[in-house]
Amino acid sequence: MSHWLIKSEPDVFSIDDLAKVKQEPWSGVRNYQARNFMWKEMREGDLALFYHSNAKPPGIVGIAQVASEPYPDPTQFDPASEYFDPKASEDKPRWWLVDFSFVGKLVKPLSLDELKQDPILSEMSVCQRGTRLSITPVLLEHFKKVCRLAKSEKLINKK
DNA sequence: GCCAACGTTGGC
DNA sequence: GCCAACGTTGGC
């Protein structure tokens, strides 16, 4: 099992939105590295830290779970979509995604500032300067520590 | 294949 | 709103 961190702007799609809809196709990712993580490396059941970017403050606010196998992002075929890609075809999709389901909100969200001040968690790629990647792998060690600091006991025991 | 120009991300 | 970092595009 792998662990991940996924970024989302709360103005666009927040952890509360995910809680409401229960499950969401992670459409609109247009970065090859992020796509490859979803396409090649994610497996149903993997857990992800849900991170709010462009938020006040930015930080980790919840947990989500990979809830589907990878499949082509339908928005790439839709001329009306802002994510339409004229170079993609149904025969040769360029963009792939997975669904994420809601697992829980953190009792105590962890701001980016707090992450950076932690000697262990500051190793996470989201803390490195200039890291814009919207999907990154997370070490089990880091995932567990986030759960512990965020008082998500259930998540720790679950594993 | 190089690289300048341009666009995007996202913290601050 | 600013701007550093970094990805993509396209002329050559």
Image (cartoon, coloured by chain):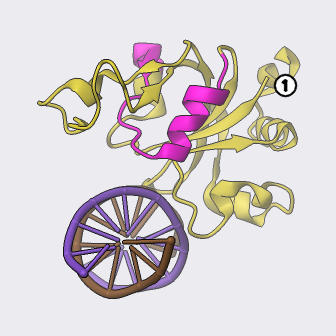
Chain colours: A yellow, B brown, C purple
Q: Is residue A38 left or right of residue B3?
A: right
Quadrant of residue A42 within the rendered picture: top right
Screen quadrant of the N terminus of chain A: top right
Q: Position of residue A125 (x, y in %)?
A: 68, 56
Task: Tell me which residue sits at (64%, 55%) in the image.
Answer: A126
Q: Give, as a single range, the part of the protein colored magenta.
A: A19-43
Quadrant of residue A102 within the rendered picture: top right
Quadrant of residue A158 within the rendered picture: top right
Q: Position of residue A18 (x, y in %)?
A: 45, 23
Q: Is residue A16 magenta?
A: no
Q: Position of residue A88 (x, y in %)?
A: 29, 32
In this view, A49 is above or below A110 = above
Task: Tell me which residue sits at (48%, 31%) in the image.
Answer: A15
Residue C12 or A7: which is nearer the viewer? C12
Q: Is residue A28 magenta?
A: yes
Q: Position of residue A14 (x, y in %)?
A: 42, 35
Task: Tell me which residue sits at (79%, 54%) in the image.
Answer: A121
- The residue that disc 1 covers is A156
Question: Helix or strand or loop: what does disc 1 sit on?
Answer: helix
Task: Tell me which residue sits at (51%, 58%) in the image.
Answer: A132
Three-letter code, disc 1? Ile
Q: Is residue A57 left or right of residue C3?
A: right
Screen quadrant of the C terminus of chain A: top right
Mark 1 surroundings within 10 Å by alpha-carbon count, few (fewer than 14), some (14 through 19), many (20 or more): some
Instruction: Identify the chain of the residue marked 1, using the numbered disc in the image.
Output: A
